[in-house]
Image: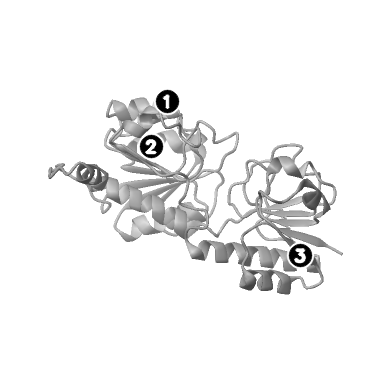
């Protein structure tokens, strides 16, 4: 019998949905922390992000269905056995992450981060001129579900939108101009807001180097909702400290957690949240994850191709 280990926090209604998708399978419920190596080794299907180090290329494992869009810890050679399918949760996080970063950008344009700081010290001070999303140029780097959702919101409020993808495609809804990654340097100087939603891969690590940060306008806002290692943290600190960028909104950092003594914390033109834009903070996100997992359980039971299968070479959904 096919054994399914579920480590996401599934409640009774979620368990019923998962089990109805593949009634002939045997289900075991645990948590990422409590799932033992024995439980993981016996599982044919795992739903949720068990610690990568516990998998040990299990030959029994047929499918690992992640509850995250990011896959970087699981595409490392030796984590999964050859032939094990890997699926991510792309499609579950678009609303939660895109809205979080979008609000960060709007708030920084209106200097609300400064007014919040002023409030904390009871200071009634005018922070001067602000900018608007309308008629600004918004560059979205990484046009998956999250990036596309962000672009559509910016377009709806009157922004001119530019998108960067790694592969050529048909026009993307909400994107006025579409370019490939190797054209990034040409469009960075045009952007008033740069919103990055890149996964953690060898190709994306350090993509925002000191040289690329220097290409951005000194009035630009850089937002990162992908992976922290996309940005050279030291270079970002220098750019922000020296007002070479207007500001940055970061839900991810490098390293994570950001050490409490890191100088980024002390800058008044950076807004940091502790990688919480995704997760299960928005209830709808978890419901979407359960639906993705249920569909893939059904596909596995019927011997059908799965949804959201990940390419191990790129870390992206195929």
Q: In this view, does 106 lie above or below 265?
A: below
Name the image quarter holding the N terminus. bottom right
Picture coordinates of residue 118 (x, y %)?
Answer: 20, 42
Q: In this view, does 209 lie above or below 177?
A: above
The Cα–Cα distance between marks 2 and 1, rounded to whole angstroms, is 19 Å
Secondary element at image label 2:
helix
Of 126 and 170, nearer the camera is 126
Q: Is residue 76 above or below residue 101?
A: above
Q: Residue 27 carries which label?
A: 3
Total marks shown come to 3
Q: In this view, does 196 lie above or below 6?
A: above
In the image, taking residue 95 as reference, residue 44 lies left or right, namely right
Q: Can residue 176 be seen in this view?
A: no
Q: Residues within 10 Å of mark 1 (few under 14, many from 20)?
A: few
In the image, taking residue 200 as reference, residue 139 lies left or right, namely left
Q: Name the residue under label 1.
A: 234
Picture coordinates of residue 200 (x, y %)?
Answer: 57, 39
Secondary element at image label 1:
helix
Q: Mark 2 points at which residue?
A: 188
Of 165 and 117, nearer the camera is 117
Picture coordinates of residue 145 (x, y %)?
Answer: 51, 56
């Amino acid at each position: 019998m096919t054994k399914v280990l579920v480590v996401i926090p599934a409640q009774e209604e979620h368990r019923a949905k998962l089990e109805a998708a593949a009634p002939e399978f045997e289900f075991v419920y645990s948590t990422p922390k409590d799932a033992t190596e024995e439980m993981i080794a016996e599982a044919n299907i795992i739903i949720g992000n068990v610690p990568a180090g516990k998998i040990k290329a299990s030959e029994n494992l047929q499918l690992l269905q992640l509850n995250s869009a990011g896959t970087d810890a699981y595409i490392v050679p030796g984590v999964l056995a050859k032939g094990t399918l890997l699926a991510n949760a792309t499609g579950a996080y678009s609303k939660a992450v895109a809205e979080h970063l979008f609000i960060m950008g709007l708030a920084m344009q209106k200097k609300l981060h400064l007014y919040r700081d002023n409030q904390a010290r009871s200071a009634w001070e005018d922070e001067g001129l602000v900018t608007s999303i309308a008629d600004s140029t918004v560059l979205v780097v990484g046009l998956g579900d999250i990036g596309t959702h962000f672009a559509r919101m910016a377009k709806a409020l009157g922004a001119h939108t530019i998108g960067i993808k790694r592969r050529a495609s048909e026009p993307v809804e909400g994107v006025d101009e579409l370019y490939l990654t190797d054209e990034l340097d040409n469009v960075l100087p045009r952007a008033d807001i740069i919103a990055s939603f890149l996964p953690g891969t060898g190709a994306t690590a350090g993509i925002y180097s000191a040289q690329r940060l220097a290409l951005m306008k000194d009035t630009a806002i850089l937002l990162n909702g992908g992976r922290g290692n996309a940005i050279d943290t030291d270079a970002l600190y220098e750019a922000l400290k020296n007002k070479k960028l207007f500001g940055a909104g970061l839900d991810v950092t490098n390293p994570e957690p950001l050490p409490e003594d890191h100088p980024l914390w002390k800058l008044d033109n950076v807004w940091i949240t502790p990688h919480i834009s995704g997760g299960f903070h928005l209830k709808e996100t978890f419901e979407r994850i359960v639906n993705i997992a249920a569909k893939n359980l059904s596909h596995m039971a019927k011997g059908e191709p799965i949804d959201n299968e990940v390419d191990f070479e790129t870390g992206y959904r195929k």
